[in-house]
Amino acid sequence: MRAKSAVFYLTFCWGLVGVLALFARAIVRLTPYAWQPIADGSLAPLHVALYVAWVAFNAYSEGYRAFQKSFCPRVVGRAYHLAQNPRPLFALLAPFYCLSLFHANRRGLTVAWVMLAIIALLIGLLRITPQPWRGIIDGGVVVALAWGMLAMIVMGARALAGTPPRAKLNLPGT
């Protein structure tokens, strides 16, 4: 096993840190909205039950199943692949590469761009959603994103230790 170069580490870390920064930004922006109905006591018992159920549902369906089992292994795997096979422009755009927004097979590109459009649409709709409903929805999203961040950090550390995740990388020609 040959030693990794500085370019490998810089490319890998730039790809992951860029994606993690997007998650962190979303968590920082959404947490006050998620916390607001709890802090101001505006949740009725039905709202509390829905909040807890929504957070639990998002932790499992989005955090565990979507992020930990699918999205994060692909992002970390693509970061690792790019770090092993660096191209200057791809390395510069590593976070976008890791998100499969370019240099991916047709299915990977379609899924990435459609999901980006859906997320943008949902963000727009959520901005006009009144409390406590917005807080309830954002609470689930924050938990799922935090789970995804933690999973990505653990997988990234394992990859740097020599065990990258096994994932479909959606590379062209695959």
Image (spheres, rainbow, N blue to C red):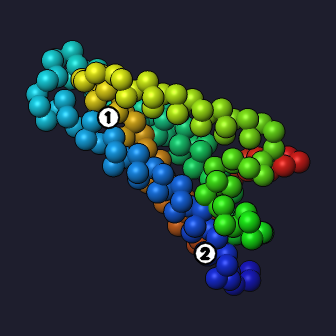
Q: Is residue 105 above or below residue 83?
A: above
Query: Where is mark 1, residue-wise?
Result: 139
Circle nearer the N terminus (2, 1) = 2
* Disc 2: CA contacts within 10 A as few (<14), some (14-19) or many (>=20): few
Q: Quadrant of the N terminus?
A: bottom right
Which of 131 and 47 lies nearest the eye of the viewer? 131
Q: CA distance from mark 2 to mark 1?
A: 33 Å
Q: Residue at x 48, y 35 (%)?
A: 62
- 101 to the left or right of 54: right
* Disc 1: CA contacts within 10 A as few (<14), some (14-19) or many (>=20): many
On residue 10, the disc is: 2
Q: Residue at x 53, y 45 (%)?
A: 68
Q: Amino acid at mark 2?
A: Leu
Tag 2, which secondary structure? helix
* Image location of residue 115, percent across then percent down: 61, 34
The furthest residue to the left:
41
* Image location of residue 145, percent across then percent down: 43, 44
* Image location of residue 12, percent across then percent down: 62, 68
Q: Amino acid at mark 1?
A: Gly
Q: Residue at x 31, y 26 (%)?
A: 134
Tell me the quarter of the picture where residue 26 sits: top left
* Image location of residue 22, percent across then percent down: 48, 51
